[in-house]
Image (cartoon, helix red, strand yellow):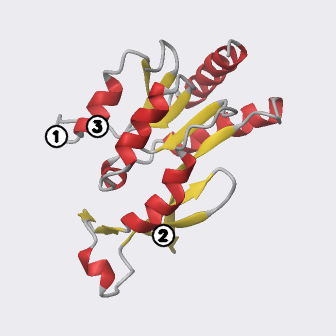
Amino acid sequence: MAGPGKCFLITGPPGVGKTTLIMRVFETLKASNPNLKVQGFYTREIRQGSERVGFEVVTLDGRRGPLASTTISSPESLRWPNVGKYRVDIASFESLALPELQVREDTDLFIIDEVGKMEMYSSSFFPAVLKVLESNIPVLASVPIPKFGRDIPGVARLKNHPGATMFTLSTSNRDAVKDQIYSILVDSLSKQ
């Protein structure tokens, strides 16, 4: 399993900037070390005007596809699971995210944004996340805050992982947390 200081989890309320923080850390790391091998993905909102109509999964090399939507209506989408008003496109998610979670010898860092309810509808996703943790390669991931005081079981398992360090993001601490995570990751990556 990932050793101490190898799994960094960002949590906080929706819209606080978890994805933005992760992407800023990633961009800063890549700028300071262009040869860094980073694998993973992030999720991005899809908006029509001011309304959020879905999410897409984006790999770190720029490939993208739907994760969830309120606007897709096909016979196939009627069988997709719902999270709130969104229908989750598991096949699209898996086609992009799962290859990014394959452990390779030359990988320096994994970014997983996010380990949440939509992603957990994929029966292959959480086992892939656990394999990443077992690889002892540093992981930077985001997880949702507990809803109604209860964590998603997989999220609780990550939070309780012996190698996990949790950072709770707020609008007042975003810059400090970004700088702290960047420094910790630079230190962790230099020890590999």
Relative placement, left or right, of 146 versus 36 is left
Q: Residues within 10 Å of mark 3 (few under 14, many from 20)?
A: some
- Residue 8 pos. (x, y %): 49, 25
In which quarter of the view is residue 115 placed? top left
29 on left or right of 69: right
Give whichever of 150, 94 is nearer the camera. Answer: 94
Kind of residue sitting beneath label 3: Gly
Q: Residue at x 34, y 25 (%)?
A: 159
Label 1: element kind: loop
The answer to which image quadrant residue 142 occupies is: top left
List the residue tagged with mark 3.
154
Q: Residues within 10 Å of mark 1 (few under 14, many from 20)?
A: few
Considering only order in the chain, which callout, 3 or 2, is on the residue closer to the N terminus?
2
Q: Which residue is mark 1?
A: 148
Foreground residue among 58 and 136: 136
Instruction: Examine the rendering and report whether any part of residue 2 can be seen.
Output: yes
Labelled pair 1, 3 in contact (Cβ < 8 Å): no
Asked whether 3 or 86 is in front, the reply is 3
Residue at image location 53% in from the left, 22% down from the top: 136
User: Looking at the image, is mark 1 or mark 2 earlier in the sequence?
Assistant: 2
Residue 40's spot in the image, x, y percent? 57, 45
Query: Which numbered tag is attached to residue 50?
Result: 2
Q: Is 85 situated above or below 28?
A: below
Q: Amino acid at mark 1?
A: Phe
